[in-house]
Image (cartoon, rainbow, N blue to C red):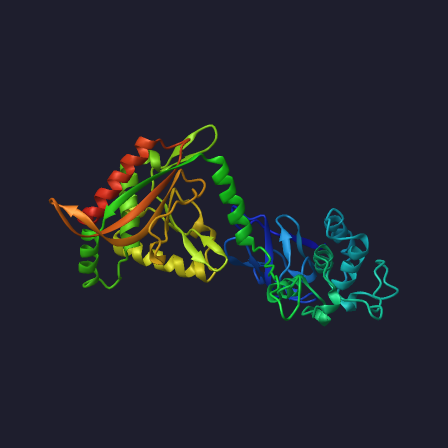
Amino acid sequence: MAEIMEMPKLSDTMSEGVVAAWHKKIGEKVKSGELLAEVETDKATMELESYFDGILLYTGVEQGGAVPVGKLLAIIGKEGEDIASIISKYTKDSPLVSEADEKKLVVENTPIREVSASSTNGIHLNPEPEGRIKASPLAKAIAKEKGLNLNIISGTGEGGRIIKKDIDSYFSSNTFETNSYPSTPSESFTDTPVSQMRKTIARRLSESKFTAPHFYLTMDIDMDKAIENRNAINTVSESKISFNDFIVKAVANALKKHPKVNSSFLNDKIRTYNYVHIGVAVAVDEGLLVPVIRFADTKSLSQISKETKNLAQKARNKQLQPQDWEGNTFTISNLGMYGIESFTAIINPPDACIMAIGGISQVPVIKNGQVVPGNIMKVTLSCDHRVVDGATGSEFLLSFKQFMENPVLLLL
């Protein structure tokens, strides 16, 4: 009996997955636990293992194609099995697959040795009509939607078949001019397909911005002692400590003093966490990932430093696993290294707050009645007013300021 593999939900926010690579071809043997495909989610590219033993009889999309969670990804069974009814069940409700394309799917995804003109399963292998464009149903649907002539596309699929990846590549590498007069300026634009990660970022942050009533608190932090202590630590420490490591540790300590900030709004209740898991926003090519430093209040500066570097590298290489990004209770977003003086950040659900960190600026300050050079860092706390009031957020910032301006307290 043929076994069905549906697209699994590989992250808490995943709605569909893109097959980055197939490691098995139709007609090849596959064993349970063997690598079948690499699937790009909204947060990482993950390896998907086969659940069954048998022959790979069908794949739902070509490499580069997207499959919604719970929809047909692959069929594994015995050689020669009739899978037409299974494919029909999954494709009949899809707006991108017509009845003609559904029949074509059966033909194109059944190994040639399993099909003949006299086959009892009703599937017939017919030669491609002369002049007919070979393209997957998804590629045809996208091309029709965008008004694209498939004759100008080169296919990279099996036998020169045009697949979704070819359409995406065409749009990402070409600009389309509305006027093409050589002697006058022309208007042009480039369409770039929205990645899974960017779709999820757009959805989650829109929900956060328009659901959680945000308010913002900004405070100046005197960084003179933090600079002095960091320089002293890095002269003897094997693991170089960054200002961000100081910030993570100071936030963690402040959260222990002000647990209301370490909370989430869950409709009919407010959940206050007795542990501190701090998400640290990391910029990658396609958007923003937030790996999590777990139990940050129990870790030393050197431990936080090593863990942050490791998670940031995994994020950029798309190697993060669900345990790396789930469970944050508070988030830090640091744009100081880009020269940003201050900014406001959108809360990262389910957190009640996010702290935006600006750069360290050399400015004149007043100390002991005299104007002297100083090093100031601006931080802005975005708060969900359903959970955190102004006084609560301000008290948290005062504790954070105390830890940052007296960093020896972070070593106790």
User: Depth check: 332 or 266 in front?
Assistant: 332
Q: Residue at x 79, y 60 (%)?
A: 104
Residue pushed farthest top? 268
Rendered image quadrant of residue 330? top left
Q: Residue at x 81, y 65 (%)?
A: 115
319 relative to 222, above or below: below
Q: How many marks?
A: 0
Q: Is residue 382 left or right of residue 224?
A: right
Q: Residue at x 79, y 62 (%)?
A: 107
Q: Is residue 385 left or right of residue 73?
A: left
Q: Is residue 268 left or right of residue 389?
A: right
Q: Is residue 79 left or right of residue 177?
A: right
User: Depth check: 149 or 86 in front?
Assistant: 149
Q: Position of residue 99 (x, y in %)?
A: 81, 52
Q: Position of residue 40 (x, y in %)?
A: 55, 57
Residue pushed farthest front? 183
Image quarter hosting the N terminus: bottom right
Q: Residue at x 27, y 49 (%)?
A: 377
Residue pushed farthest right? 118
Q: Position of residue 378 (x, y in %)?
A: 30, 47
Q: Position of residue 406 (x, y in %)?
A: 18, 47
User: Depth check: 389 or 349 in front?
Assistant: 389
User: Depth check: 121 or 319 in front?
Assistant: 319
144 relative to 264, above or below: below
| Residue 22, visible in the rendered structure | no
| Residue 401, visible in the rendered structure | yes
